[in-house]
Image (cartoon, rainbow, N blue to C red):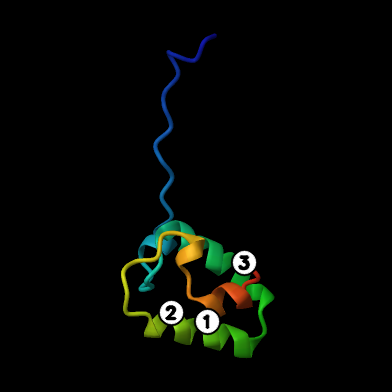
Amino acid sequence: MFGFLRKKKAPQTYIAAERTNTPLSPELTRMVAEELPLLDSTSRARVYEILREHTGPVITEQADLPEELRRMLDLD
């Protein structure tokens, strides 16, 4: 009735996002993966190149994405 006897759901993990080799957090990895099919092949190749060249810390927020990538994915 009040929900205190219900079993709590475990946080969802996405194996594909966990096993990728990108400088993105799992949440951003899923977001970029959802946007990639909307890009043409040249733009997708550039996205892969930008991510491969990234040498900074793991990106956890959209605002931390490189400017070119944000513009390509229309996140601004």
Q: For mark 2, give the secondary structure.
A: helix
List the residue tagged with mark 1. 47
Q: CA distance from mark 1 to mark 2?
A: 6 Å
Residue found farthest to the top = 1
Label 1 crowd (10 A; few <14 / some 14-19 / many >=20): some
Indicate the quadrant where residue 8 lies. Answer: top left
Gap in angstroms between the C-alphas marked 3 and 2:
16 Å
Quadrant location of the C terminus in the rendered image? bottom right
Label 2 sits on what residue type? Leu
Instruction: Answer above or below: position of 41 versus 35.
Output: below
Name the spot of residue 43 as percent of width and height, x first. Answer: 61, 85
Q: Residue at x 39, y 36 (%)?
A: 10
| Circle 3 SS class | loop
Q: Are marks 1 and 3 in contact (CB under 8 Å)?
A: no
Tell me which residue sits at (54%, 9%) in the image. Answer: 1
Residue 33 circle label: none
Q: Earlier in the sequence, mark 1 or mark 3?
A: 1
Q: CA distance from mark 1 to mark 3?
A: 14 Å
Residue 61: x and y, percent?
46, 59
Location of mark 3 (residue): 75
Q: Residue furthest bottom?
A: 42
Q: Is residue 21 left or right of residue 12?
A: left
Instruction: Report the side of 31 relative to 9 (left or right).
Output: right
Decide: few, some or many residues near mark 3? Use Cα within 10 Å; few <14, some 14-19, many ≥20: few
**Residue denoted by label 2:** 51
Q: Is residue 31 left or right of residue 6?
A: right
Q: Residue 70 appears at what percent x and percent y?
A: 57, 72
Which sits earlier in the primary sequence, circle 3 or circle 2? 2
Q: Say what amino acid the circle numbered 1 marks.
A: Val
Choose mark 3 or mark 2, whichever is in front. Answer: 3
Identity, as a three-letter code, of the amino acid under mark 3: Leu
